[in-house]
Image (spheres, helix red, strand yellow):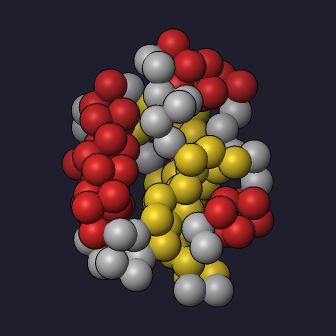
Amino acid sequence: MDLHEERLDQVTALSVKGRIDSTTAAQFGQKLEAVVADPSGRLVVDFRDLDYISSAGFRVLLVAAKRADQSGSRLVLCGLSSKVRQLFDVGGFLDLFSITATRDEAIAATR
């Protein structure tokens, strides 16, 4: 898994490439936690280059979403490929997250 972080208009954008699985989920979770712990944190996670996410990855996302709710920060996902969207759908996660098609829509949704 490769992570690329950038700051866009007071929003942290995290691009994920490759796989989020049991070997990479902790690293991914640490990046998420660093942003969503801040009450003014706004995080967009761009999954356009994500190939696969396991149950460990979903757990990290759920923990981050709960933490964002508690701290008042905002977490928005974007760019799910049809393959990754199917994993979210099968796991029942589509309704649990704010998900947009593009990064620009996700940035707008953090406001």
The residue at 52%/25% (across/down) is 88
At which x and y percent is residue 87? 53, 20
At which x and y percent is residue 75? 47, 59
Quadrant location, the C terminus? bottom right
Q: In this rendering, does residue 78 appear at all?
A: yes
Furthest residue toward top: 90
The residue at 28%/35% (across/down) is 59
Q: Nearer the viewer, residue 94 or 81?
A: 94
**66 with respect to 6 (left or right):** left
Furthest residue toward bottom: 9
Image position of 34 with respect to 101: above or below: below
Q: In this rendering, does residue 34 appear at all?
A: no
**101 with respect to 9 (left or right):** right
Image position of 49 with respect to 15: above or below: above
Image position of 105 with respect to 50: above or below: below
Q: Nearer the viewer, residue 56 or 21?
A: 56
The residue at 36%/34% (across/down) is 58
